[in-house]
């Protein structure tokens, strides 16, 4: 969940996993997977930063050893290569 602010200064908490896309027109408009549109005071960059921070916290909880780079997509760690014992 990320904390945002409506244009009338009312606080709003949004499930970051439901965001379909974010646009500027000139206000920041968030479209959810449900089709609902939210207009917020934060810039697109601020919303993206909050979503990235939410994802970092979430993925750190479920896999603290995983290495994630949210600017270039998730890096899924590979299991260590097994040495010896193979055929060939």
Image (cartoon, helix red, strand yellow):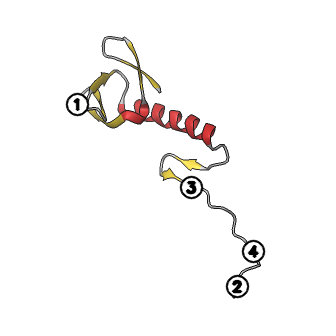
The residue that appears at 47% across and 27% down in the rendered structure is: 1
Of mark 1 and mark 3, the one earlier in the sequence is: 1
Q: Do the residues labelled 4 and 1 touch (CB within 8 Å)?
A: no
The residue that appears at 75% across and 74% down in the rendered structure is: 83
* Residue 45 visible in the snapshot: no
Q: Residue 83 carries which label?
A: 4
In front: mark 2 or mark 4?
Answer: 2
Of mark 4 and mark 1, the one earlier in the sequence is: 1
Determine the CA span between mark 1 and mark 3: 35 Å
Q: Residue 74, image x and y in percent?
A: 51, 51
Report the residue marked by disc 2.
87
- Please determine whether, in this image, residue 19 is positioned above or below residue 10: below
The residue that appears at 37% across and 11% down in the rendered structure is: 10
Q: Is mark 3 on a helix, strand or loop?
A: loop
In front: mark 1 or mark 3?
Answer: 3
Q: What element carries label 2?
A: loop
């Amino acid at each position: 969940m990320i904390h945002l602010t409506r244009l009338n200064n009312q606080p709003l908490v949004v499930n970051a996993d439901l965001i379909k896309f974010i646009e500027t027109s000139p206000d920041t408009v968030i479209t959810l997977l449900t089709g609902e549109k939210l207009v917020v005071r934060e810039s697109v960059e601020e919303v993206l930063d909050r979503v990235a921070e939410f994802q970092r916290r979430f993925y750190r909880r479920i896999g603290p050893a995983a290495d994630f780079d949210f600017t270039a997509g998730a890096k899924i760690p590979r299991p260590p290569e097994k040495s010896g014992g193979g055929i060939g």
